[in-house]
Image: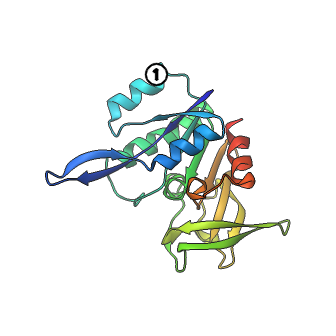
Amino acid sequence: MKIILVTQRIEKIGKFLENRNNLDTRVTDYLYKIGYLPILVPNNSALMLKLIKNIKIKGILLSGGGDPRKKDVRQQIERYLIKYSINSNIPLVGICRGAQAINLYLKGKIVKIRNHVRVKHYIFFKNKKKFKVNSFHDYGIKKNSLSKQLREIACAKDGSIELFSSKKNKILGMMWHPEREAKIKYNDKKLIKKIFS
């Protein structure tokens, strides 16, 4: 099985406000079900560097949840992993916040958008194909805020970009959460497997 590194949130939990690594278990379940071995990246720069030095990774997934503009250790780790992906030609997928983090790293912007929290909507491709996705974000990427190093693949009816890829590297950003679907969707699986192939 191909090893995929997966980033995590940092959350303060309990009455002692412990800093904890946190990830929806559906993310690792999803990756395993579609044929990958997920390895969680701790929010510790030294440990992360040891991981990528000692494990033969075949891909990186930047998980969702949280603000990618927040200057914390998770942001530092994800920025390092984006750079590492580009320099080492390792496939990279960003889900929701992860997609936003990729766009920001590559000098794009994110903007406040409406009607994208806890809804389902269609995304539209240039070839007129469409499929329905879930939506859990209140910040998104408009056409004029997409990095010049990225290309739009599909957008929502309001014009916000829902799916993009790199013009040069094996990088994919998707603004929805494939792991939150009750059943694995063929289109989601196909997109991810194409990048991690």
Please state if 110 lies on the left or on the right of 160 as rendered.
left
Residue 11 in percent (x, y) is at: 29, 52
- In this view, 35 is above or below 23: above
Please state if 191 lies on the left or on the right of 22 as rendered.
right
User: Of residues 65 and 87, which is closer to you in this image?
Assistant: 65
Q: Residue at 60%, 58% (x, y): give it.
A: 181
Q: Residue at 71%, 49% (x, y): give it.
A: 191
User: Of residues 103 and 190, which is closer to you in this image?
Assistant: 190
User: Of residues 167 and 36, which is closer to you in this image?
Assistant: 36
Residue 71 in percent (x, y) is at: 33, 54
Report whether residue 42 is seen: yes
Report whether residue 62 is seen: no
Q: Identify the residue at the far top of this view.
A: 54
Residue 34 in percent (x, y) is at: 66, 40
Q: Which residue is disc 1 drawn over?
A: 53
Picture quarter with the N terminus: top right
Q: Number of marks in the image?
A: 1
Please state if 70 lies on the left or on the right of 15 as rendered.
right
Picture quarter with the C terminus: top right
- In this view, 106 is above or below 158: above
Q: Residue at 32%, 36% (x, y): give it.
A: 44
Q: Residue at 52%, 57% (x, y): give it.
A: 107
Residue type beneath disc 1: Lys
